[in-house]
Image (cartoon, helix red, strand yellow):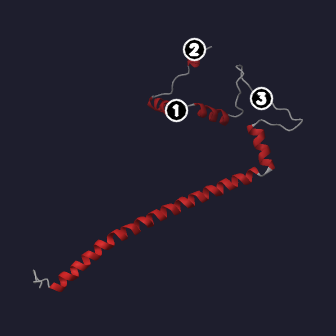
């Protein structure tokens, strides 16, 4: 027979042992449940993201179904022209194409410049007290 230890009776010890066994049995189950819920929520977020991407792609496909859009893209990207139209291309003295707008020139420069070069130029420019002088301005007429 069990003897009481520090005010604990046999029943309370048995109840404590059953409670501990139940906790040991339930903790892995609850842990698995929580992990499954986290995985489920991340998968739902991933599915929602993919659904948004599909909607964007469907909108892109719908745009390409429009003959006006296709015509504009062909004129812009492939330099197509309608019969009877004359296209003019600007070139500099070297024969290289000249961008038609300042924005196009800036985008072309950005496309040709590596990111680390742009970052380095920015660091150098920020470390100078005054902007570099224009050599053509110091020579005079």
Give 139 or 121, whichever is nearer the viewer: 121
Badge 1 local density, few (<14 within 10 Å), some, or many (20+)? few
Badge 3 local density, few (<14 within 10 Å), some, or many (20+)? few
Q: Residue at x 56, y 21 (%)?
A: 134
Q: Is residue 19 left or right of residue 46?
A: left
Q: Nearer the viewer, mark 2 or mark 1?
A: 1
Q: What is the number of the mark on residue 118?
A: 1
- Total numbered badges shown on the rendered structure: 3
Location of residue 86 (image quadrant): top right
Above or below, comparing residue 11 to residue 21 in the picture:
below
Above or below, comparing residue 21 to residue 95 in the picture:
below
Which part of the image, by quadrant, shows the N terminus? bottom left
Mark positioned earlier in the residue sequence (2 or 3): 3
Residue 54: give x, y in percent of width and height: 64, 56
Give 72 or 9, whichever is nearer the viewer: 9
In space, the residues marked 2 and 3 are separated at their CA atoms by 35 Å
Give the residue furthest to the right: 84
Q: Nearer the viewer, mark 2 or mark 3?
A: 3
- What residue is disc 3 on? 89
Q: CB under 8 Å between callouts 2 and 1?
A: no
Give 36 or 56, whichever is nearer the viewer: 36
In space, the residues marked 3 and 1 are separated at their CA atoms by 29 Å
Q: What is the number of the mark on residue 139?
A: 2
In space, the residues marked 2 and 1 are separated at their CA atoms by 29 Å
Q: Residue at x 80, y 30 (%)?
A: 88
Which part of the image, by quadrant, shows the C terminus? top right
């Amino acid at each position: 027979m069990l003897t009481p230890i520090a005010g604990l009776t046999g029943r309370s010890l048995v109840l404590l042992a059953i409670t501990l066994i139940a906790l040991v049995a339930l903790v892995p189950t609850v842990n698995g449940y929580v992990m499954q819920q986290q995985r489920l929520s991340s998968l739902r977020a991933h599915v929602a993201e993919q659904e948004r991407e599909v909607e964007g792609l469907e909108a892109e496909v719908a745009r390409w179904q429009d003959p006006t859009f296709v015509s504009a893209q062909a004129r812009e990207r492939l330099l197509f022209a309608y019969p009877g139209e004359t296209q003019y291309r600007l070139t500099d003295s070297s024969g290289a194409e000249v961008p038609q707008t300042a924005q196009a020139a800036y985008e072309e420069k950005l496309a040709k410049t590596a990111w680390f070069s742009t970052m380095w130029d920015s660091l150098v420019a920020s470390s100078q007290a005054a902007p570099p002088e224009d050599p053509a301005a110091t020579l005079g007429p």
